Image (tube, rainbow, N blue to C red):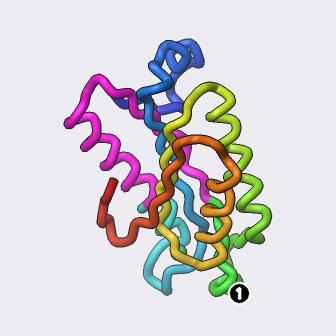
Amino acid sequence: MIFNLEAIPWTELDRLDRSQALVMIPLSPIEEHGPHLPLGTDIIAAADIAAQAAARLNDEDPQRPVVLSPALPLGCAAITADFPGTLSLRGSTLRAVVCDICRAWVGHGFKNLLICNHHLDPVHMKAILSAIRLNECNLFAYAVIDHDIRY
Ligand SMILES: [Zn+2]
């Protein structure tokens, strides 16, 4: 079953089997993608990938809870930082945010976390991977491009 974190009360989340639940966290920056695409291209795609992957997982195992965490429009995009609208974080900032989010989930007993990313800036990827190494949980991170879903 799929649970949209923003739409459920904490009591519903509290009833889930934390050892089986998979929390999906869409994460990608707001940045330029040429003159024809929206600044939210990466985070829109990351959220869509999370939703599609959640639907597939639900088809395969409807008993396993899948929690869709709110999409985080954050990331490191120094290469495109000069374009109006690109909102780039420092790697240390992103690492701290990812660490805090993961620690919060782990603190609530959820250990299966999946970061759904749609942005491959090396600083961005390094920050996520560094955050994962700091957390003692079954945290997966996957770079996904062009809706090539793998899990
Ligand atoms: Zn990008």
Q: Is residue 108 on the magenta stretch?
A: no
Question: Does the beta carbon at disc 1 come under 8 Å from ligand 1?
Answer: no
Q: Name the residue under label 1.
A: 82
For numbered disc 1, what is the local secondary structure? loop
Counting from the top left corner in percent of width and height, residue 136 is at 64, 43
Residue at the extreme left: 59
Would residue 17 be found to the left or right of residue 130 on screen? left
Q: Residues within 10 Å of mark 1 (few under 14, many from 20)?
A: few
Would residue 50 be found to the left or right of residue 70 on screen? left
Is 112 or 136 nearer to us in this picture? 136
Above or below — where is 138 with respect to 49? above
Indicate the amino acid at tag 1: Asp
Counting from the top left corner in percent of width and height, residue 92 is at 79, 66
Q: Is residue 60 on the magenta stretch?
A: yes
Is 106 or 51 nearer to us in this picture? 106
Q: What span is in magenta?
A: 46-73
Q: On the rendered image, what quadrant is the N terminus found in?
A: top left
Residue at the spot x=60%, y=26% of the render? 109
Residue at the spot x=27%, y=34% of the render? 58
Residue at the spot x=45%, y=61% of the render? 142
